[in-house]
Image: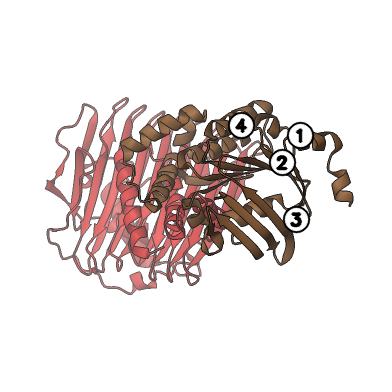
Chain colours: A red, B brown
Amino acid sequence: MDLASLRKKAEAGFKAVGFPSTKEELWRFTDVSRVAASDFSSEWKSSDLAFEALDKITVVFENGRLSREKSNFDALPQGVCIGSILDLADSRIGTLADAENAFVTSNTAYFSDGYFIELTEGAKLDAAVHVVYLADVEGAAFHLRNFIAAGAEAEVTVIEEYIGEAGRKYWTNAVTEVFAADRAVVDHYKIQRESAEAFHFQTLESQLGAGAQFSTHAVTFGSALGRNDIRGRLTGEDGEAACNGLYLLKDRQLFDTHIFMDHAVPQCRSHQLYKGILDEKSRAVFCGRILVQQDAQQTDAVQNNGNLLLSRAAKVNTLPQLEIYADDVKCTHGATVGELDEEALYYLQTRGIDPRKGHAMLVFAFANEVLDSVKCTAAKTYIETLVQDWLDKVDV
Amino acid sequence: MPLLEIKDLHASVADKPIIKGLNLTINPGEVHAIMGPNGAGKSTLSNVLAGNEAYQKTSGQVLLDGVDIDDLTAHERARAGMFLAFQYPVEIPGISNMYFLKAAVNAVREYQGKEQLDAMDFLDLVEEKKKVVKIRGDLLERAVNSGFSGGEKKRNEIFQMAMLEPKLGILDETDSGLDIDALRVVSDGVNALRSPERGFLVITHYQRLLDYIVSDFVHVLVDGQIVKSGDKSLALELENDGYASWVGE
């Protein structure tokens, strides 16, 4: 199907099916009726929002449209191509993001822009590609469509950062599809700093060839209502997928993470480490599903979700789901919801550290464990600063 | 002035009396060993001294350098010069040993009215102390005690003690779970930290630690009280005869 037909079909699907309700299993804890009930405009303007470039290559979107002036992706090594998705003709668009829910179908139907990054076989990009989405139009819907395709043995680091103006209410609806061919390495980060009033939804789909490595770290600070749907398909032996994340929530924020890791072939590894810190009346949903198909012998899959509640009114629904049809596999999962470790606090105190400082150190440490696996130094330093800023404001 | 004076100390855990009238005086430069069977109150004593809120002091007095420590919380006692080497050091994933040590050293220095160490000075201090307590550099970069072996954890305790330079070091069964090599390294560290000003309270079940850390005084703790005190020969006596005669009484 060509792209135009695909978009037409998606629009028809979106109009016929509409938004999911909490009666559906996958949306049990996340009520999106507020999104469904909102009218979104397609008004456009440039954006004055500031951002900090994290590396040499930046791709900047202002209210859903690529800004050539603010971007900097002209000097690229051979074999690397970056641009607007509107200029890409690739029949693979839409082949991974095939879910029939309203967020994917409306995105496919209405996406206004997005980035693509293509690397030919063996191409390597040393600098991280920092993609910045600036949002400051009240009442707008931003349907962003992204596409990463790394050829065999290619290597790339991509940091998606969503920045919204405080106080603005809008809807970001992004879909990113990642194709990592054999032995390719794709290191993906998502830093979500939408306004506290915004809706934010993203579907991140990845497909890994033999020996490919895909990792994603999703760090969430913003949005009143948000969700990450992350799906990995391990389709070649010896592939490795890591989905890690951190959500820091307060007020009445609700953030939902749904992961689906599909082990279709033998000898693949997948890791999930998600941590949340919740204050006030915030809520988190974590659903990590691991499917090990019958042929996927010697699968090594680990899943962990840890939550720290700073307030008695905060709430977490965490649902690990392992579905295993092979008999020679190593799969573990664990979920915790708790408060700070009193013993650790005492230990810090016996070293002269006062309880207030000790408390702050332990909360940071709790979050920081997710960042241990961050390979990109620029991303790590930046995220650590953002986490520290967030913690300073919540008065842990 | 004595470094530590414990006068008729009574303490409970979950309302159960454990320490029942304990007296002990440690002068600067002295090493005291407290030996006792399981359940004698060894860990309770170290935790009460360090200020663990799960342990309640019910009566008596504890003076550190002449100051009653009743009103001091755990971190204030640490800043005042008390150091507890844990029997089971706590693992803290997510905080690097170096970051942790710097926070601790600077907290203590602030209390003592000394300048905060910057990154360079701190590294110099680490290098200096690494010579005293043999510890691998990579352990310092890793998260506090996280995934450390038993021996590495204890070594880390002694390294922290070296960094914080306390007036009084309390070693709570530091020898438990150590093989002879680790025991020797840890003991060498403690011996290197001995000074005319610093005192030690070495709490142990077994005599073998005292082969390496030579004590000036040995006390036998049974059922929350010191039932006998003597010099280092008392430890050997216990090694030969065990605690049976004491516990039986």
Which residue is tagged 4? B187
| Mark seen at residue B233 | 1
| Mark seen at residue B224 | 3
Q: Nearer the viewer, mark 4 or mark 1?
A: 1
* Residue B71 screen position, x and y as percent: 52, 64
Q: CA distance from mark 1 to mark 3?
A: 22 Å
Q: Is residue B193 left or right of residue A231?
A: right
Count of marks overlaid on the render = 4
Q: CA distance from mark 2 to mark 3?
A: 16 Å
Q: CA distance from mark 4 to mark 1?
A: 19 Å
Which residue is tagged 2? B218
Q: Looking at the picture, which amino acid does disc 2 mark?
A: Val
Q: In what element is the residue under mark 1? A: helix
* Structural crowding at the residue carrying mark 1, measured as other residues with C-alpha within 10 Å and reported as few (<14), some (14–19) or many (≥20): few
Mark 4 / mark 1, whichever is N-terminal: 4
Residue at the outermost bottom position: A37
Q: Looking at the picture, which amino acid does disc 3 mark?
A: Gly
The answer to whether the residues at label 1 and label 2 have Cβ atoms under 8 Å apart is yes
* Residue B109 screen position, x and y as percent: 39, 48
Residue at the outermost front position: B1
Mark 1 / mark 3, whichever is N-terminal: 3
Residue at the outermost left position: A69
Q: Out of B196 and A47, give the one closest to the viewer.
A: B196
Q: Looking at the picture, which amino acid does disc 1 mark?
A: Ser
